[in-house]
């Protein structure tokens, strides 16, 4: 399959082209039915001859070229309608009836705040031109009315409020939110790309618009005249900037906000990170250091606990405590250690303390050992020369007002040397 992408240097164009390259070059194997052999890019600076050659050979066209911020409103019609007309004329010249996708805008509805929009008028004219082309040639036409877009590589201070806010917060720039309650419908670039790949496979999502005051929302219809991306997000400006400032504080708080799969927060975080300057791509941690080694918190979450890293010096015992409800997972990533656990209290069947359970662990054969609530536990560095490095996950972030941590030696009847090392606890 040979694909033409007009507007290939723009925000959407670059994302499409790079994802098409991944499929063409075998780096993305999630679309086994797509065999891409050539990708033609067209943008400012591309010759007319190259465009004509692409129009002759293409098996699918993504028409993303257009004007968003002209110096004069008349340029909307010239840049959006005019180029679309040129493109379709070239396809007709070469009798190429391949499918053609048109990147339109919800502003083409000319409803509500979009009424009278010169940009919307130019997009609507382009839609009508494509529909007429479909009637005349029998070519398959896919018209998408995109809402506000966001994602990596989107240009700030241009036509995306999300890009503008991300760039400002990431780079400590001033910004203004005129009304925190203003709601936007937002489409994430990766969701858009997935729909474009569906379209290449003939699995686009079809719809119609009802044309009344609520006609901004697509109405799914397998035989509809329009296409749409099923996943969008309705978010207020206040929610956006609040999330962004939470992301910004993360290197200091270590607190990662809730980012469920396919959530707006997860997509916004990825977008925000793409605007970070080089000096903010790295940050340090506060290590708790004593004669035993170090303990450093790495990541905290509100609902999925925290991750820390523990470094124990040779011969050192760490832990010797238990929790009521908290549980932890220890993974030794370097060194040679022994993890011990013992249920606290007396076994009523034997009248004695519960037995000590031991796990010998090494960084060469990493294994996860779970610390059980109600069991006192420790970790001992068995090496005389090498530090023991352990990644520790706890099911809750540490709360100094409710630490749920109580001192209790694990092996009370065991090696006297270990029991004597209270200074190493």
Image (spheres, helix red, strand yellow):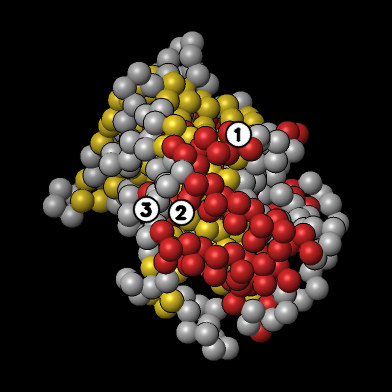
> What element does badge 2 sit on?
strand
Name the residue beneath numbered marker 2: 100
Question: Which one is in front, 82 or 177?
Answer: 82
Decide: marks 3, 2 in contact (CB < 8 A)? no
Q: CA distance from mark 3 to mark 1?
A: 30 Å
Residue at 37% x, 53% y: name it.
198
- Residue 324: in sight, yes or no? no
Residue, far front: 93
Q: CA distance from mark 3 to mark 2?
A: 14 Å
Question: Which one is in front, 65 or 86?
Answer: 86
Residue at 66% x, 57% y: name it.
82
Name the residue beneath numbered marker 1: 49
> What element does badge 3 sit on?
helix
Residue at 76% x, 76% y: name it.
179
> What element does badge 1 sit on?
helix
- Residue 231 in the image: state x and y as whole percent: 45, 64
Residue, far left: 349
Residue at 47% x, 84% y: name it.
210
**Where on the picture, by quarter, is residue 104?**
bottom right
Label placed on residue 198: 3
Decide: marks 2, 1 in contact (CB < 8 A)? no
**Where on the picture, by quarter, is residue 38?**
top left
Residue, far top: 385
First of labels 3, 1 by sequence position: 1
- Residue 12 in the image: state x and y as whole percent: 58, 49
Dot 1: few (<14), some (14–19), or many (≥20) neighbours within 10 Å?
Answer: few
């Amino acid at each position: 399959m040979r694909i033409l992408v007009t507007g290939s240097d723009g925000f959407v164009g670059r994302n499409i082209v790079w994802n098409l390259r991944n499929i063409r070059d075998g780096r993305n194997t999630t679309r086994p039915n797509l065999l891409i052999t050539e990708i033609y890019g067209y943008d400012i600076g591309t010759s007319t001859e190259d465009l004509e050659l692409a129009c002759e050979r293409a098996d699918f066209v993504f028409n993303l070229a257009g004007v968003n911020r002209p110096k004069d409103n008349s340029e909307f019609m010239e840049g959006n309608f005019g180029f679309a007309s040129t493109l379709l004329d070239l396809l007709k010249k070469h009798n190429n009836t391949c499918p053609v996708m048109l990147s339109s805008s919800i502003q083409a509805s000319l409803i509500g705040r979009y009424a009278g929009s010169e940009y919307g008028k130019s997009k609507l004219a382009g839609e009508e031109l494509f529909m007429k082309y479909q009637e005349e040639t029998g070519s398959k036409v896919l018209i998408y009315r995109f809402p506000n877009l966001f994602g990596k590589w989107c240009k700030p201070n241009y036509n995306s409020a999300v890009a503008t806010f991300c760039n400002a917060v990431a780079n400590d720039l001033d910004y203004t939110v005129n009304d925190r309650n203003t709601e936007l419908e937002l489409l994430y670039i990766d969701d858009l790309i997935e729909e474009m790949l569906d379209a290449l496979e003939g699995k686009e999502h079809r719809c119609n618009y009802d044309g009344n005051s609520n006609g901004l929302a697509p109405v799914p219809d397998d035989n509809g005249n329009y296409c749409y991306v099923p996943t969008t997000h309705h978010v207020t400006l206040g929610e956006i900037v609040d999330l962004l400032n939470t992301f910004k504080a993360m290197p200091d708080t270590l607190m990662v906000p809730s980012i469920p799969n396919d959530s707006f927060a997860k997509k916004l975080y990825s977008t925000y990170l793409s605007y970070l300057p080089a000096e903010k791509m790295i940050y340090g941690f506060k290590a708790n250091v004593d004669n035993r080694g170090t303990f450093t918190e790495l990541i905290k979450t509100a609902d999925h606990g925290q991750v820390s890293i523990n470094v124990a010096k040779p011969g050192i015992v760490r832990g010797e405590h238990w929790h009521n409800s908290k549980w932890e997972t220890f993974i030794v990533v370097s060194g040679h250690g022994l993890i011990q656990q013992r249920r606290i209290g007396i076994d009523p069947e034997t009248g004695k303390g519960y037995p000590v359970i031991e796990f010998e662990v090494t960084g060469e054969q990493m294994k996860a050992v779970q610390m059980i609530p109600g069991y006192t536990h420790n970790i001992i560095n068995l090496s005389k020369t090498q530090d023991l490095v352990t990644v520790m996950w706890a099911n809750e972030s540490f709360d100094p007002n409710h630490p749920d941590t109580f001192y209790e030696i694990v092996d009370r009847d065991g090696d006297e040397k270990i029991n004597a090392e209270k200074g190493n606890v």
